[in-house]
């Protein structure tokens, strides 16, 4: 399921201190010098003498890093590989120390190499990056020699003003500089947001495209985020901005680049698809081109002008290398490299010096695992150690104990064990009359960013849940809301999990104990929720009765395709979701009586 964002832990402070888009006008003007037309020079040229007509350009790409500088823990840190005999191997992957080594190794012997990303480099980040407003991740990406990235929806978690700071540098407006005598330098690569404009002026928020140049070779990059970003980011994050159609925008700027003589074009799109298999080596061109992939990216790819030669995508956290036909019927490469730095894509673009275009028939691409059995990049180890020292006093505080892994992000089931824990924590914290009188709680699945892993991540000991680990599960620090909803509105909300904007890719809410119902996946649309089975504490939901419902502020605003949840009245604002989660861990676990993974028996699924 796609990453479903909310607000970073400190965004409310940022927005209170620096409301509006005051600094955004400076965004394009303050771009790093030459960032729009540079090659990093990963290697030498062909030497003197006659230049061959074609040259192979190596495009390395990845997406959805989400500030995962350290290897992701538990199942969230694995990729699946299917062997010829049908067995599936789970390979531990990711971590920026290994990603740096992988990319640097891949560049060797490739004089024309460009590195691009498909968005969500930051946001929903583990504590090591999130605590410092993702400055550590931007610093790491600079060291990785990233040439360009599209914005993703998570780049808007803290609003356009904070995005401007990530691009241009400068210390945080509220928390200042984190290291004495050091000012944050910002990204030395351009963030592209072709389909995001300022409401007041109609002008692009960021550069729509950039042109990478190396010894006469020119490749244009156009970057867009998904048009639906406002539906999956809190209102403050996208205040004053308009998000436009991805296809229309890319086609518009492809024409502009073409007029400027740039014939080789790559689109960086923060929107994706779902391959029929979760194995990274699945052939999604079997039996025919693009047959093994579905989701929004398919229609987008089919609509983008043939002037664009390759599509680097993201958002769905899936791995695929597919060819989807362009509007003229010719195959075109569409790639995505999972998430969290676990894979990178290596694409060969054959550039014709005479036509200045890519020879589309010879485009080759493959995903590669960022394995953890290769040497770590020493500069990344130093970076992680430096920031870990600053984070340690907060990160290492014990919050509770667990008896085994409690899976959240790593669970593919509609009802996730960690989802039940989070929803129960929210209900328990907000049930007292003076805290809101909640009777039921809902948690959006995309807001669960990790698993709780029993194995120690540091020196804390197996089974100990630290503040850093709890933060990694719930990094947005959304304020909780308790609202009045009728039984009819509750039923509608449950139906919206599998209908409307969520029909193609259902978002199954995690529910607190006491709420039970049946989900019949053999049916379609809203009918998948069997209304007659919905009960609260054993009693059928009364459509006319008012219920007190707890949820985070993102859901309470109707986010993630749940307009019914946005209709709540008599709102009470409670503690943050992270505070309630930590309080629940403290109240329900000790070293001698750790919290066990809960049963998943609230949603009965018929397949």
Image (tube, rainbow, N blue to C red):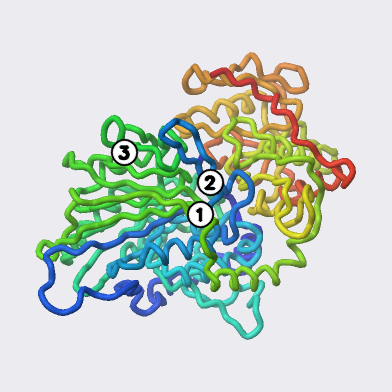
Nearer to me, 368 or 565? 368
The residue positioned 23% from the left and 53% from the top of the image is 308
Separation (CA) of disc 1 from disc 3: 33 Å
Q: Where is residue 357 shown, x and y percent of the image?
A: 16, 59
Q: Position of residue 371 (x, y in %)?
A: 51, 54
In this figure, which residue is indicated by the disc labeled 1? 371
Left or right side of 224 for 263? left
Nearest the viewer among 12 and 599 is 599
Pointer 1 and pointer 3: residues touching (CB < 8 Å)? no
Which residue has dot 3 on it?
A: 299
| Mark drawn on residue 66 | none
Comes first in the chain, label 2 or label 1: 2
| Outermost residue toward the right in this view | 592
Label 3 secondary element: helix
Give the residue drawn at x 46%, y 68%. 144
Asked whether the residues under the numbered discs 3 and 2 touch, taking CB atoms below 8 Å apart as contact, a structural biologist would say no
Of the two numbered discs 1 and 3 in the rendering, the one whose residue sits closer to the viewer: 1
* Residue 153 shows in the view: no
Residue that label 2 marks: 91
Residue 392, relative to residue 411: is it above or below? below
Between 194 and 108, the residue placed more toward the observer is 108
């Amino acid at each position: 399921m796609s990453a479903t964002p909310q607000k970073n832990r400190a965004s409310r402070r940022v927005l209170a201190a620096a409301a509006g888009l005051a600094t955004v006008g400076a965004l394009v003007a303050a771009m790093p010098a030459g960032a729009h037309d540079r090659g990093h020079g990963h290697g030498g040229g062909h030497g003197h003498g006659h230049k061959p007509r074609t040259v192979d350009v190596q495009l390395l790409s990845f997406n959805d890093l989400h500030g995962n500088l350290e290897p992701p823990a538990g199942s969230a840190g694995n990729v699946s590989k299917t062997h010829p005999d049908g067995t599936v191997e789970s390979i531990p992957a990711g971590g920026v120390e290994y990603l740096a080594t992988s990319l640097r190794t891949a560049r060797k012997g490739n004089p024309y190499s460009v590195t691009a990303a498909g968005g969500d480099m930051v946001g929903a980040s583990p504590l090591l990056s999130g605590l410092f407003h993702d400055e550590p991740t931007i610093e790491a990406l600079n060291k990785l020699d990233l040439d360009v990235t599209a914005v993703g929806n998570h780049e808007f978690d803290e609003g356009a003003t904070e995005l401007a700071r990530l691009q241009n540098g400068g210390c945080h407006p509220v928390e200042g500089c984190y290291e004495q005598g050091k000012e944050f330098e910002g990204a030395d690569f351009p963030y592209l947001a072709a389909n995001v404009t300022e409401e007041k002026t109609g002008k692009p928020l960021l550069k729509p495209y950039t042109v990478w140049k190396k010894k006469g070779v020119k490749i244009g990059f156009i970057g867009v985020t998904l048009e639906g970003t406002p539906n999956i980011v809190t209102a403050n994050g996208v205040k004053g901005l308009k998000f436009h159609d991805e296809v229309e925008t890319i086609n518009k700027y492809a024409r502009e680049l073409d007029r400027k003589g740039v014939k080789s074009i790559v689109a960086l799109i923060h929107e994706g698809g779902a391959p029929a298999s979760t194995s990274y080596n699945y052939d999604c061109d079997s039996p025919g081109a693009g047959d093994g992939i579905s989701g929004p990216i398919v229609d987008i790819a089919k609509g983008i002008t043939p002037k664009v030669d390759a599509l680097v995508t993201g958002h769905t956290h899936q791995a695929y290398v597919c060819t989807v036909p362009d509007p003229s019927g010719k195959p075109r490469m569409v790639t995505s490299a999972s998430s969290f730095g676990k894979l990178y894509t290596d694409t060969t673009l054959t550039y014709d010096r005479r036509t200045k275009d890519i020879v589309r028939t010879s485009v080759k691409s493959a995903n590669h695992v960022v394995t953890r059995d290769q040497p770590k990049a020493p500069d990344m180890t130093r970076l992680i150690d430096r920031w870990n020292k600053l984070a340690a006093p907060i990160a290492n505080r014990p919050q509770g104990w667990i008896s085994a892994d409690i899976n959240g992000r790593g669970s593919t089931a509609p009802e996730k064990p960690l989802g039940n824990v989070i929803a129960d924590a929210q209900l328990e914290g907000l049930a007292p009359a003076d805290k809101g009188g909640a009777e039921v709680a809902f948690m959006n699945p995309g807001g669960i960013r990790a698993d709780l892993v029993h194995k120690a991540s540091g020196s804390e000991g197996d089974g100990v849940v630290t503040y850093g680990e709890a933060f990694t599960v719930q990094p947005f620090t959304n304020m909780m809301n308790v609202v009045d909803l009728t039984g009819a509105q509750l039923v509608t909300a449950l139906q919206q999990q599998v209908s409307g904007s969520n029909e193609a890719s259902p978002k199954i809410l995690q529910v607190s104990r006491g709420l039970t119902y049946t989900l019949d996946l053999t049916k379609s649309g809203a009918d998948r929720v069997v209304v007659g089975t919905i009960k609260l504490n054993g009693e059928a939901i009364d459509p006319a009765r008012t219920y007190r419902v707890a949820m985070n502020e993102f859901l309470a605003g109707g986010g993630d395709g749940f307009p019914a949840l946005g209709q709540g009245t008599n709102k009470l604002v409670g503690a943050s979701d992270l505070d309630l989660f930590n309080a629940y861990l403290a109240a329900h676990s000790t070293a001698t009586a750790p919290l066990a993974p809960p049963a998943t028996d609230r949603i009965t699924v018929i397949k």
